[in-house]
Amino acid sequence: MLDPHVVRRDFPIFDRKIHGRPLVYFDNAATTQKPRQVVEAIVEFYYKHYANIHRGLHTLSQEASEMYEEAHEVLAKFINAYSWDEVIFCNNTTDGLNIVAYAWGLKNLREGDEIVLTVMDHHSNMLPWRNVAKLTGAKIKYVDITDDGTLNYDDLEEKISERTRVVAFPGMSNVLGTINDVRRIARLAHSVGAIAVMDGAQSVPHTPTDIRMLEIDFLAFSGHKMLGPTGTGVLWGRKDLLEDMMPFKVGGDTIKDVTLEDVIWHDLPWRFEAGTPNIAGGIGLAEAAKYLMRIGMEDVRRHEMELVEYTLKRFKELGDDVEVYGPTDPRVRGGVIAFNIRGLNHHVVGRTLDLFGIAVRTGKHCAHPLHYRLGLKGTVRASYYIYNTREEIDYMVETLKQVIAMKNILSRQEEISEEICTGG
Ligand SMILES: Cc1ncc(COP(=O)(O)O)c(C=O)c1O
């Protein structure tokens, strides 16, 4: 069983105090903290094996190439891909989704085709498709949510038609925590010959992911949200689709040969990894995936489900002063809790929690259309991971009680001006 108190020992950041209090890190949906093992793997690579990959016959270049290729194998295992060459290393989820939208979309979409997205999508899964729709003449349709924040599957069935070519959706909402029925969505997409593109930014780090079971065609996720370094991410794609795609970012390492007239693209995955990649980052990401596999993704999921259940239970003590969004059943929601304290601006609540050492995110979390759909200016978001404990939740709830007690004073605080959306 996952014991967060033991896990925490691998994370030096928890020795830190914030405003004189122990750090409570509840901003894991934005990015997670890093264990020693990941940082040490990166340091070891730089100190002992560093060279560019695929460019030299010398020993260091061979070692670096091998380590980087092995990292792809680890990530393939992590999501149960059929082979490691279907696994493209990229910068983050956003990058992976842009690659699909441009490299698949520009080649395959035509005027009159339809792309089905959801109102709960993060901007990273909306805007690339919207741009590609403009370039190709395709039309975008949005699937709505129900009142409790579940994807509206009736609406999905209605929106999907013979003209649908793409259905893109999140595995899990980064605001509502809703876990979507991926296989159901993928099957509906396939029933009309469309591809199913899954934004796994929030689901892959927190739930077991088996691309064979999910029956999807593309999956993108971020390394930095699963203990890995920033600047790392993965795009997995069905091999036949990847092979048919036009490389989107091209240059060094994407080719086998180039003449002034022609180009022969490299094998997968290299044709989609243009230029010198984030070699050390990829090696660090593999170490992060190994760390999570040692714990077991089922246990990660179970742990977060318990934390969510516990939070929802303890939030009842706050009565009408708190409004929580998303499904109430912890079995269909991940470790993300978005809420508001009635009568207080979300930024004011977040800033006050920070004074007590609690890191949460406030704002619209790069899901502005979802917030407009919910009629909200923003939310406070607590999001959990393997090192979070019940005691930390107790501390947050007790702190929120103090925040509520100070409501009259705090509500007079000037509202912090609109957020600058930079992630999560
Ligand atoms: C659901 C979802 N999709 C996409 C992203 C984008 O991730 P990244 O900033 O790592 O590209 C995020 C997080 O920021 C997210 O929560």
Image: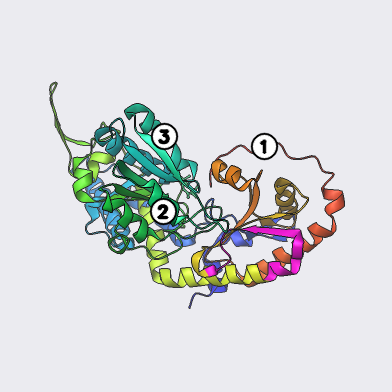
Would residue 419 appear left or right of 329 to someone viewing this image? right
The residue wearing badge 1 is: 418
Q: CA distance from mark 1 to mark 3?
A: 24 Å
Mark carried by residue 130: 3
Q: Residues within 10 Å of mark 2 (few under 14, many from 20)?
A: many
**Along the line of sight, the residue nearer the viewer: 381 or 148:** 148
Residue at image position (53%, 43%) is 423
Q: Position of residue 317 (x, y in %)?
A: 74, 69
Q: Secondary structure at mark 1?
A: loop
Structure colour scheme: rainbow
Q: Position of residue 275 (x, y in %)?
A: 30, 35
Q: Do we see residue 289 in this rendering? A: yes
Mark carried by residue 406: none
Q: CA distance from mark 3 to mark 2?
A: 19 Å
What's the amino acid at mark 1? Glu
Q: Please give the range of residues in magenta.
A: 314-330
Task: Examine the structure image and report whether residue 320 is included in the region drawn in magenta.
Answer: yes
Task: Examine the structure image and report whether residue 262 is included in the region drawn in magenta.
Answer: no
Would residue 260 appear left or right of 320 to someone viewing this image? left
Would residue 153 appear left or right of 406 to someone viewing this image? left
Q: Earlier in the sequence, mark 3 or mark 2?
A: 3
Q: Secondary structure at mark 2?
A: loop
Mark carried by residue 200: 2
Q: Secondary structure at mark 3?
A: helix
What's the amino acid at mark 2? Gly
What's the amino acid at mark 3? Arg
**Along the line of sight, the residue nearer the viewer: 48 or 8:** 8
Question: Does residue 28 lie above or below 315 as drawn?
Answer: above
Foreground mark, 3 or 2?
3
